[in-house]
C-alpha cells in the first residue's frame, strides 16, 4: 500500500510538468495580450507604444516563449508561482485565500447531493416502476437538465427578494456566528448540489438494481433477514462502491470551483479567480490555478482509491 | 367657517412643508452605506486602470484635483492651483491633511501631514518603469517636479498640455505615503492601503468585500460612518441586492433593468450626463474597405437611428461623431452627414463595380461583397449589429456578425485582422487623438488610418490650451474623418447608477465616485 502511494505521488511530477507546458502553450496561442487588455479597460488612458512596450518588458513578455517557460519553471521549483499581472498579488496567496470558500461550498454541495441522492436512488430501485420511481425519474431529469444559473436566480427571487429569509449573495463569516455562515451557504450549496444529486440518484438506482439481483441478496433474504437489513446492510454497502468513484471525481471538480454558481451568488471562490485570470490573460495566475486544480484532482482521486481498499476488502494495492 | 377651514389648511400645509424640508435638510450622521460593485482587483492606485477599483480608491486616497459634479476639476489635496505660463503648474496643498493612522505604519495618533514631498514621491513612483503603472504614459508630459516648500509643488510639462489636469485627477494618480509603500511592499500595500482620503480601510476580502470606516480626522467630516463595497459580479444580482435592501447603491445597472427600476418608488435612478461612444470602425487598409465608395455605401445602408431607438429607447442618443454633446469639440453640424439612404448606397456600390450575382448577393469579379462585423460579446452591441447586418443582407450584401471574447477582439483589432468592427470606446478629451492619429496605429488607431492633415490638426489640438480654439481644430479634424468615413458613429450609451431613495447628496459620475468632496457629503436618511 505504502509503495503504491509513493508510486502514484511520483507519477504526479511528469503529469504536472506536462499540464504546465500545455497551459503555457495554449495561453500563448490564444489571441490577446495581457497588457493591451489591461489598458483597453479604461477609455481614459490612451495606450501609447512606449507604455505598452515598457510594461511588456517589465512582465518579461518580450522574451522568447521558451525562455519565459524556463523562467516560470525555475521559479516554480523555488516554490514561487509568480505574481498576478493584474492584482500584483503572489499567485499562491491568492489561491490559498480563496480555497476555504471553495472548499466550504464544495463540501456543503457534496453533503446536500448525497443526502438527496442516496435515499432517492435506493427508494426508486427498491420500488422499481412504481409511481414513486417515476416521480424520482422526473425529478432527476429536471435536476440534470436545469441550468444552475436559472435555479440560482429563482431561489434568490423566492427566498431573498420575496420572503426575505436568506441573504441574497456573498459569503458568511464565523466571526458573525455559525448562523451567518449557514444562511449564506444554503442557496449556493443547494444550487450546486442539486444537479449533482440528480446524477448521483440515477447512478445509485442502477447500481442498487444490479446488486439487488445478485445471489448474496437472495441468500440474505432466504436467511430470513428483514428487508431493511437486506437493503441497508447488504445491498447498499455493495451498491455504493461505484458511486464512491463518481463522488470522488465530482468532488475534484467542485474543488476547482463552480464559476456560474460563484458568479451568481458572489461567492469568493477559486472558479471566479480562474476565469477572471483567463479573461485578463493573467498568465501567472492561470498557470497557478490550473496547476493547483490538477494537483488537487490527482490527490482527491488518490484518496478515493485508498478509501476503496478500506470499504471493499477485496481490493488490494501492491 | 370656510375662512377658518382655509386658515387651518394653510397652517397644516405650512407645518407639513416646514417639517418636510427640515427632514431633508438635516443630514443624518452615522449610517453605513453598502455599495454593489462588479469587481475590485487591487487597492494600490498606481497599479490599476480599472474604473471599479477607482471607485474604492477615491474614498481612501486623495488626488491633487478631483472631478466635480459637472466634470470640471475641483480642489482635493490641492486647495488651489495656478498656471504661471503654458507649461508651469503650481499646486498649493491643503494644510492639515494627515495620513490614516491606527495601522502598521502610523500607530494611533502618530500620523504625519501630507506634504509636497509626498506628491513628488507619488508622481515619480507612477513614472518609474519598475512600478509598472499603466499611467506612466499619462504623466509622460511632465518635464520636472519641484518642491517649493512644505505645501507647494511646481510641475513643469514638456510642452503646453491642455489635458494635464484631466490626467492628474484620475484616481490612478493618487498621492501615497512613501513609508507605507516601503514598509508594506507593493503587495502588502495593495491589500491594506494607507491614504489620506475620507475613509480608511478596515478589510479587503478579494472577490467578496472591501470594508471602509470613516476617517474622523478628515478635513471634512464624512456623514457616513462607514462604506462597504460588496463585490457582486453579476449586474442583475446587484440590482436584486438593491431591491432586497442588501445594498443602497449599485454602480452598474444593466439597460434591461432600467425600465423596471423606474417603476420602483424606493429606488432612484441616475443617468450619466455623457454617454459612452459606440461606433463601427473600418480597417481602411483591408479590401474592399480601402475604397471610399464602399465605406460610404455601408454608412448609408442601414437605418442606424431606428436601430438605436429600438434597442435603447432613451437610454442612448444617436452619435454623428466621436465627440459627444457637452464636450469640447462636439459638432452638431455633422448630423446626418451620410443619411440613411439604401438606394443611394446601392448606386454607390454599383458605381464601384458590384452587381447582383445569381444568388442575389452583390459581387465583383466573382468575389462576393462580404462584410463581417466583429464585436465583443455584449448584448446591446450585438442587437444593434444584428439589425444592421439584417438590413445589409436585404441590400444584397453578404453581411454577418462575429461575436468575440474580449481578448480576441482586442487582438484582432490591433492586428488588423478586421474589415468592419465594433470600435474601441476611447472618449473624452484625448479620444480623437487615440483613435485616429497615425502614431497610434495598431494600438488605439485600429483603423490603420494615416492622414497627415488629420495628424497635423490633432497635434495642434493637443497643445492648444484655449478650449474654444481647441474646439475649432477638433471640429475640423472630425469633419475630415467623417467625410472620409473612417468610422460609422452609432450612439452614445448612457450609464445608469441606482440607489436607495434614502440616499442624499449623491451625484453619480462616469469615472469617479465622490462620497465626500468639497461639493458633497453623502448621507443616508432613515
Image (cartoon, helix red, strand yellow):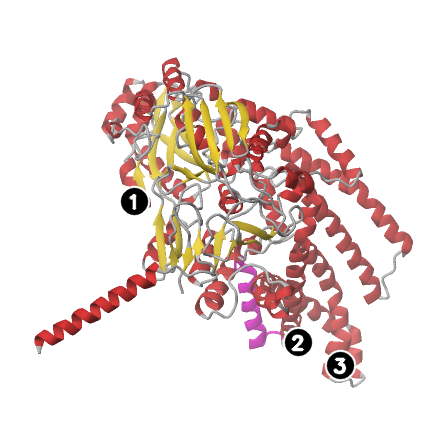
Q: Residue at x 66, y 59 (%)?
A: A106
Mark 1, residue position? B310
Q: Residue lying farthest top?
A: B452
Is B301 in front, or is B109? B109
| Rendered position, B213 above or below B372 | below
Q: Same chain for marks 3 and 1?
A: no
Mark 3, residue position? A229
Question: In the rendered structure, the residue with mark 3 lies on which chain?
Answer: A
Query: What type of secondary structure mainly makes up the magenta span?
Result: helix
Q: Secondary structure at mark 1?
A: helix
Q: Residue at x 73, y 59 (%)?
A: A245
User: Which disc, if any, is residue B272?
Assistant: none
**Of label 2 and label 3, which has the lower sequence position?**
2
- Specify the segment rendered in magenta: A128-148
Taking B483 as reference, is A9 left or right?
A: right
Q: Is residue A133 magenta?
A: yes
What quarter of the picture does the C terminus of chain B occupy? bottom left
**Spot occupied by residue B20 in the image (x, y as percentages of width and height):** 29, 64
Amino acid at each position: 500500500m505504502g509503495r503504491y502511494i509513493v508510486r502514484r505521488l511520483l507519477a504526479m511530477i511528469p503529469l504536472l510538468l506536462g499540464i504546465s507546458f500545455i497551459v503555457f502553450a495554449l495561453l500563448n496561442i490564444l489571441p490577446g495580450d495581457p497588457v493591451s487588455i489591461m489598458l483597453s479597460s479604461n477609455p481614459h488612458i490612451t495606450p501609447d507604444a512606449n507604455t505598452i512596450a515598457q510594461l511588456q518588458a517589465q512582465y518579461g513578455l518580450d522574451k522568447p516563449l521558451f525562455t519565459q517557460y524556463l523562467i516560470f519553471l525555475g521559479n516554480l521549483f523555488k516554490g514561487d508561482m509568480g505574481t498576478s499581472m493584474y492584482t500584483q498579488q503572489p499567485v499562491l496567496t491568492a489561491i490559498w485565500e480563496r480555497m476555504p470558500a471553495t472548499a466550504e461550498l464544495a463540501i456543503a454541495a457534496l453533503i446536500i447531493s448525497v443526502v438527496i441522492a442516496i435515499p432517492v436512488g435506493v427508494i426508486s430501485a427498491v420500488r422499481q416502476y412504481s409511481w414513486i420511481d417515476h416521480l424520482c425519474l422526473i425529478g432527476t431529469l429536471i435536476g440534470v437538465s436545469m441550468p444552475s444559473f436559472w435555479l440560482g436566480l429563482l431561489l434568490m427571487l423566492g427566498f431573498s427578494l420575496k420572503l426575505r429569509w436568506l441573504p441574497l449573495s456573498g459569503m458568511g463569516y464565523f466571526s458573525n456566528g455559525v448562523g451567518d455562515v449557514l444562511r449564506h451557504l444554503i442557496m449556493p450549496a443547494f444550487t450546486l448540489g442539486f444537479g449533482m444529486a440528480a446524477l448521483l440518484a440515477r447512478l445509485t438506482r442502477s447500481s442498487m438494481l444490479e446488486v439487488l439481483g445478485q445471489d448474496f441478496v437472495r441468500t440474505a433474504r432466504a436467511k430470513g433477514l428483514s428487508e431493511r437489513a437486506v437493503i441497508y446492510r447488504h445491498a447498499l454497502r455493495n451498491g455504493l462502491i461505484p458511486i464512491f468513484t463518481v463522488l470522488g471525481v465530482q468532488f475534484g471538480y467542485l474543488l476547482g470551483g463552480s464559476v456560474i454558481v460563484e458568479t451568481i451568488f458572489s461567492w469568493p471562490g477559486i472558479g471566479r479567480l480562474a476565469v477572471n485570470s483567463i479573461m485578463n490573460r493573467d498568465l501567472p495566475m492561470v498557470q497557478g490555478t490550473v496547476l493547483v486544480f490538477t494537483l488537487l484532482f490527482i490527490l482527491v482521486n488518490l484518496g478515493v482509491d485508498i478509501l476503496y481498499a478500506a470499504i471493499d476488502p477485496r481490493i488490494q494495492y501492491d | 367657517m370656510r375662512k377658518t377651514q382655509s386658515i387651518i389648511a394653510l397652517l397644516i400645509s405650512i407645518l407639513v412643508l416646514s417639517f418636510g424640508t427640515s427632514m431633508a435638510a438635516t443630514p443624518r450622521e452615522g449610517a453605513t452605506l453598502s455599495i454593489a460593485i462588479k469587481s475590485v482587483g487591487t487597492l494600490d492606485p498606481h497599479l490599476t486602470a480599472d474604473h471599479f477599483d477607482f471607485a474604492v480608491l477615491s474614498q481612501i486616497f486623495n488626488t491633487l484635483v478631483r472631478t466635480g459634479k459637472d466634470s470640471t476639476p475641483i480642489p482635493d489635496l490641492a486647495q488651489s492651483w495656478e498656471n504661471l505660463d503654458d507649461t508651469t503648474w503650481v499646486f498649493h496643498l491643503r494644510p492639515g491633511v494627515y495620513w490614516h493612522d491606527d495601522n502598521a505604519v502610523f500607530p494611533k495618533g502618530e500620523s504625519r501631514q501630507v506634504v509636497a514631498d509626498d506628491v513628488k514621491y507619488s508622481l515619480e513612483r507612477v513614472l518609474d518603469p519598475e512600478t509598472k503603472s499603466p499611467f506612466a504614459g499619462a504623466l509622460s508630459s511632465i518635464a520636472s517636479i519641484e518642491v517649493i516648500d512644505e505645501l507647494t509643488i511646481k510641475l513643469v510639462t514638456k510642452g503646453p498640455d491642455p489635458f494635464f489636469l484631466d490626467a492628474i485627477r484620475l484616481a490612478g494618480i493618487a498621492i501615497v505615503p512613501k513609508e507605507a509603500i516601503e514598509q508594506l511592499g507593493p503587495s502588502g500595500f495593495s491589500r491594506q492601503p494607507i491614504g489620506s482620503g475620507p475613509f480608511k480601510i478596515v478589510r479587503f476580502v478579494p472577490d467578496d468585500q472591501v470594508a471602509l470606516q470613516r476617517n474622523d480626522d478628515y478635513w471634512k467630516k464624512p456623514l457616513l460612518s462607514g462604506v462597504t463595497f460588496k463585490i457582486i459580479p453579476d449586474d442583475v444580482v446587484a440590482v436584486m441586492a438593491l431591491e432586497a435592501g442588501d445594498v443602497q447603491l449599485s454602480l452598474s445597472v444593466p439597460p434591461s433593468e432600467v425600465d423596471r427600476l423606474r417603476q420602483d418608488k424606493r429606488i432612484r435612478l441616475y443617468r450619466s450626463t455623457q454617454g459612452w461612444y459606440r461606433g463601427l470602425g473600418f480597417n481602411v487598409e483591408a479590401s474592399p474597405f480601402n475604397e471610399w465608395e464602399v465605406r460610404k455605401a455601408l454608412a448609408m445602408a442601414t437605418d442606424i437611428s431606428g436601430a438605436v431607438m429600438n434597442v435603447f429607447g432613451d437610454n442612448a442618443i444617436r452619435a454623428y461623431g466621436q465627440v459627444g454633446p457637452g464636450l469640447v469639440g462636439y459638432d452638431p453640424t455633422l448630423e446626418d452627414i451620410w443619411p440613411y439612404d439604401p438606394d443611394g448606397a446601392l448606386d454607390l456600390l454599383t458605381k464601384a463595380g458590384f452587381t447582383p450575382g445569381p444568388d442575389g448577393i452583390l459581387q465583383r469579379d466573382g468575389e462576393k461583397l462580404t462584410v463581417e462585423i466583429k464585436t465583443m460579446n455584449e448584448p446591446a452591441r450585438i442587437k444593434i449589429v444584428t439589425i444592421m447586418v439584417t438590413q445589409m443582407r436585404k441590400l444584397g450584401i453578404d453581411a454577418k456578425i462575429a461575436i468575440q471574447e474580449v481578448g480576441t477582439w482586442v487582438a484582432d483589432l490591433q492586428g488588423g485582422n478586421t474589415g468592419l468592427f465594433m470600435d474601441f470606446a476611447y472618449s473624452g478629451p484625448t479620444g480623437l487623438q487615440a483613435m485616429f492619429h497615425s502614431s497610434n496605429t495598431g494600438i488605439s488607431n485600429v483603423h490603420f488610418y494615416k492622414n497627415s492633415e488629420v495628424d497635423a490638426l490633432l497635434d495642434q489640438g493637443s497643445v492648444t490650451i484655449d478650449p474654444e480654439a481647441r474646439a475649432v481644430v477638433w471640429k475640423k479634424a472630425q469633419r475630415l474623418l467623417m467625410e472620409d468615413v473612417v468610422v460609422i458613429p452609432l450612439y452614445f450609451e448612457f450609464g445608469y447608477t441606482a440607489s436607495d431613495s434614502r440616499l442624499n447628496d449623491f451625484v453619480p459620475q462616469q469615472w469617479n465616485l465622490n462620497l465626500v468632496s468639497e461639493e458633497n457629503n453623502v448621507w443616508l436618511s432613515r
